[in-house]
Image: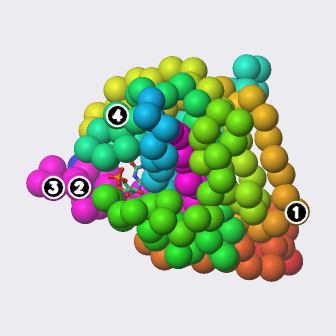
Amino acid sequence: MTESTHCELDLSPRFRDAMAAFPSGVTIMTTADRSGRPWGFTASSFCSLSLDPPLVLVCLARTARCHPAFYQSDDWSIQIVAPRHLALVTRFATSGADKFAGGEFTPDDRGVPVLPDAPVTLTCAAHARYHGGDHSILVARVQDVTLLDDRPLLYFRRTFQPLACPRDVTASGEDR
Ligand SMILES: Cc1cc2nc3c(=O)[nH]c(=O)nc-3n(C[C@H](O)[C@H](O)[C@H](O)COP(=O)(O)O)c2cc1C
């Protein structure tokens, strides 16, 4: 096998680089535990799963401090964030940080913290949880959607970027 298809020694750095080459949006997923304490983390592993029923998934590291809270509570919220939320995204990506100290979030009617000016907010109920290696796969059933006319923050090769002036790509692969 060639080096480009097989890396016997240590796949980890190449795997990480390969995953970093896949651009994504950025989300903050939130919940509240039984005592009402809010929890959340920055997640780029968000993706849609099913239309009927409406399901999405997010993968959460089993070592994350917030992991038990997402198993305790069946009420979740997922917000797709904008470039103006960069400081918030960084805070929610810092394990153990006092994430809600800035007061940007308000509790919804279930007590789950939500970001009022997020471009997209998905009000979710826990649908399933699966093991996935060192992560848990959190499958969320979407119960309500809030959409603002706004552009998302992007993440590509470990850097945050705004969505540049969008242009269509033609059949030849050239953008116009
Ligand atoms: C852009 C970005 C995307 C991330 N996506 C994920 C993700 O999808 N799943 C995950 O478990 N951690 C992800 N992380 C790391 C978590 O946000 C980070 O470990 C988090 O602070 C864990 O929170 P806690 O340990 O305080 O509960 C991401 C970090 C960044 C910067």
Query: How far apart are the alpha carbons under marks 2 and 4?
Result: 26 Å
Residue holding disc 2:
12
What amino acid type should be assigned to the residue bearing mark 2? Ser
Determine whether the residue tagged by mark 1 lies in a helix, strand or loop. Answer: loop
Which quadrant holds residue 13? Answer: bottom left
Residue holding disc 1:
149
Q: Which mark is residue 10?
A: 3
What amino acid type should be assigned to the residue bearing mark 3? Asp
Q: Are marks 2 and 3 in contact (CB under 8 Å)?
A: yes
Classify mark 1 as within 8 Å of ligand 1 or not, answering yes or no. no
Is residue 25 visible from the viewing direction of this image? no
Query: How far apart are the alpha carbons under marks 2 and 3?
Result: 5 Å
Determine whether the residue tagged by mark 2 lies in a helix, strand or loop. Answer: helix
What amino acid type should be assigned to the residue bearing mark 1? Asp
Q: Are marks 3 and 1 in contact (CB under 8 Å)?
A: no
Which quadrant holds residue 102? Answer: bottom right
